[in-house]
Image: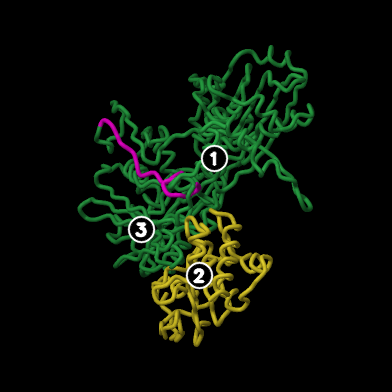
Chain colours: A green, B yellow
């Protein structure tokens, strides 16, 4: 057995690798000493509460805060009117360009509400109870509009339109009519028609996945203190202190140098605490009242208006020869973007066939707006829905051909030199080694005992982006955001994957 | 909205404590905001997640569903009161050794619930442990490591 094999089979012993050290923040956490954002109390602090939309889709006709403002103890009220004009502004936020108007409206609606639970106002008061009670006195008048919550319905010509100005970007070409389809991606390799002709067996299946929330136990929380000298300090439950700082600076149109973000212990994020929600709102409240403001969500607010992962419709068609060699694959993926464009369809399309050597493949993907919260990253965002669908069909093919599902995957596994459907040619990816390690493991070989025991295998792919301590540079252009004063930006401080020993913060 | 406050005396983590609270206030609110014992967490504020669990007169209770005035005369233990004079409780040690925590928000609730169980039943079966921890939700680690850590702690306590 080679050295490398011994390494991945866990037969090589190291002093550090393979050990299980006690986590460095463990003692704080088992004694109740660890400080999470909601644990912070500052002198003269005010407490915030949101007013949220009861409608999935509605025009905001008016917001009357006069009664709420009269409640003794109320110190600040913020609505969409209090935000800077962000029309047509775009910011590079590390994982891609973000339309700032969309990001801001996800924090607080302007003009229309696009999902139930979208914030329309926020209030700060000298106690949480006063804020809660006074928030009920903010009167919002809505004109309800028809709504749509299933991705295939939202793609229909007859669907209610969320963003009248939206046109489909199909391979760089803009569509000519209002739509909810933000993006159409298309990848092609070889000729699927030829590939399916070569197949002895073709299986095509449809899959629907639900919208799923990341489900962190700690609700979103922040404390913001905007001082009279213009400096803004934020304590936050965020997965990235630097992206939190940049998003907040962009949304408030202030220089990043004026914003300091203190990341507290985070009570789970799983991708859902990368975007800002509470931070800019608490900042605006703080600027208005001159006090630090704590803004925490309640559990129902977290579920209604943060996260989730996209619900999806995926159709997979795979062709295979009798001997078990895949000849062609075709995938159609339609993913919820949520209320604003920019969901997880890209990684979905790139990952759907990424584990297999497919000579002929075609992938169509659609990013679709509908009346649900804006989808966010969630543990390999977009890849899981695609992998679930593809792996079901792989299993079915193996079963129909009476080939062991692990052997079937080994036979067709992507390897060094395999060209993924979206273009890249793999360096060494390790799938074959991983499958072989699984094959020689007791977890695969041991006899099943007891009732209702089964065993399965599935393959999946994700990119190693390496965000947690990496640098990225981006050139400044005439349209670069004013808040980023340097021509290149260095991003680090990500707390996404494994900054500590845990694989799943 | 001022309201008349109630005077409450309770024993918390071995100390006699007095506090004033409104009739509407939950025990969790008073522990966290008035007494600054922030170890008990608010995950849901409606009795679902168990992150706010504290021991009240020997019984694990959800502090978000207990009124603070109900603590009059009660003996309470929060996660801050589990360690003994600078030494971690075996449960805390076993949670660390067994990697039974990640983000740590559910951890105080699990520890307190498990302590209440072991105080009454020093040698619980796996089934009993799972049954007693059923009201505590964890999102990061899964439950096996937590259950195993409670089993380990029971063994350590028995050996003492």
Within the image, what quadrant is residue A440 found in?
Answer: top right
Does A11 appear above or below A97? below
Q: CA distance from mark 2 to mark 3?
A: 35 Å
Dot 3 falls on which chain? A
Q: Residues within 10 Å of mark 3 (few under 14, many from 20)?
A: many
Q: Nearer the viewer, mark 2 or mark 1?
A: 2
Of the pair B28 and A126, the residue shown nearer to us: B28
The magenta span reads: A487-505
Q: CA distance from mark 2 to mark 1?
A: 46 Å
Q: Secondary structure at mark 1?
A: strand
Give the label on residue A223, or none. 3
- Measuring from the top left, give residue A316's x and y in whole percent: 68, 28
Q: Nearer the viewer, mark 2 or mark 3?
A: 2
Q: Which residue is mark 1?
A: A338
Give the label on residue B90, or none. 2
Within the image, what quadrant is residue B142 found in?
Answer: bottom right
The answer to whether residue A31 is magenta is no
């Amino acid at each position: 057995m080679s050295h490398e094999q011994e390494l991945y089979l866990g037969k090589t012993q190291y002093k550090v690798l393979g050990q299980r050290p006690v986590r460095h923040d463990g003692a704080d956490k088992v004694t109740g000493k660890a400080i999470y954002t909601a644990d912070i109390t500052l002198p003269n602090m005010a407490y915030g509460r949101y007013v949220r939309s009861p409608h999935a889709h509605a025009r905001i006709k008016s917001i009357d805060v006069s009664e709420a403002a009269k409640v003794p103890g109320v110190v600040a009220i913020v609505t969409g009117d209090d935000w800077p004009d962000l029309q047509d502004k775009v910011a590079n936020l590390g994982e891609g360009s973000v339309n700032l108007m969309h990001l801001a409206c996800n924090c607080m609606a302007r003009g229309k509400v696009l999902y139930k639970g979208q914030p329309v106002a926020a209030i700060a008061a000298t106690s949480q109870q006063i804020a809660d009670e006074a928030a009920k006195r903010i009167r919002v008048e809505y004109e309800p509009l028809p709504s749509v919550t299933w991705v295939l319905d939202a793609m229909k010509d007859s669907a209610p339109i969320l963003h009248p100005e939206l046109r489909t970007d199909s391979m760089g070409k803009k569509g000519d009519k209002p739509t909810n389809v933000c993006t159409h991606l298309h990848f092609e390799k070889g000729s699927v028609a030829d590939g399916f002709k070569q197949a002895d067996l073709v299986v095509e299946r449809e899959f629907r996945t639900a919208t799923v929330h990341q489900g962190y136990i700690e609700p979103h929380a922040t404390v913001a203190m905007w001082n009279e000298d213009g400096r803004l300090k934020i304590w936050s439950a965020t997965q990235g202190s630097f992206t939190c700082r940049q998003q907040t600076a962009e949304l408030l149109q202030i220089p990043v140098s004026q914003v300091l973000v203190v990341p507290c212990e985070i009570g789970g994020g799983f991708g859902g605490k990368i975007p800002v929600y509470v931070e800019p709102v608490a900042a605006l409240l703080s600027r208005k009242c001159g006090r630090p403001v704590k803004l925490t969500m309640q559990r129902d607010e977290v579920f209604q208006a943060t996260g989730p992962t996209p619900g999806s419709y995926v159709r997979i068609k795979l062709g295979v020869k009798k001997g078990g060699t895949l000849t062609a694959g075709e995938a159609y993926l339609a993913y919820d973007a949520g209320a604003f464009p920019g969901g997880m369809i890209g990684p979905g399309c790139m990952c759907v066939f990424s584990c297999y050597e497919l000579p002929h493949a075609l992938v169509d993907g659609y990013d679709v707006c509908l009346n649900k919260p804006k989808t966010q990253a969630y543990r390999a965002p977009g890849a899981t829905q695609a992998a679930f669908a593809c792996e079901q069909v792989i299993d079915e093919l193996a079963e129909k051909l009476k080939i062991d599902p692990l052997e079937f995957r080994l036979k067709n596994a992507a390897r060094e030199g395999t060209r993924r459907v979206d273009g890249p040619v793999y360096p060494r990816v390790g799938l074959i080694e991983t499958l072989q390690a699984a094959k020689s493991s007791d977890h695969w070989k041991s006899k099943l005992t007891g009732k209702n025991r089964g065993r399965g295998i599935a393959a999946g792919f994700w990119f190693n982006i390496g965000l947690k301590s990496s640098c990225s540079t981006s050139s400044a252009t005439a349209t670069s955001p004013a808040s980023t004063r340097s021509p290149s930006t260095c991003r680090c401080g990500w707390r996404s994957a494994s900054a500590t020993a845990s694989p799943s913060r | 909205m001022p309201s008349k406050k109630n005077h409450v005396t309770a024993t918390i983590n071995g100390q006699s404590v007095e506090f004033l609270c409104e009739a509407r206030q939950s025990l969790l609110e008073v522990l966290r905001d008035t007494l600054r014992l922030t170890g008990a967490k608010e995950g849901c504020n409606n009795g679902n997640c168990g992150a706010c669990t504290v021991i009240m007169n020997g019984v694990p209770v959800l502090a978000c569903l207990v009124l603070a005035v109900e603590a009059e005369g009660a003996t309470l233990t929060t996660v801050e009161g589990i360690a003994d004079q600078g030494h971690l409780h075996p449960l805390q040690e076993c949670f660390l050794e067994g990697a039974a925590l990640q983000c740590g928000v559910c951890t105080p609730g699990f520890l307190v619930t498990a302590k209440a169980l072991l105080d009454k039943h020093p040698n619980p079966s796996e089934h009993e442990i799972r049954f007693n921890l059923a009201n505590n939700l964890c999102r990061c680690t899964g439950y096996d490591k937590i259950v195993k850590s409670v089993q380990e702690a029971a063994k350590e306590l028995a050996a003492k």
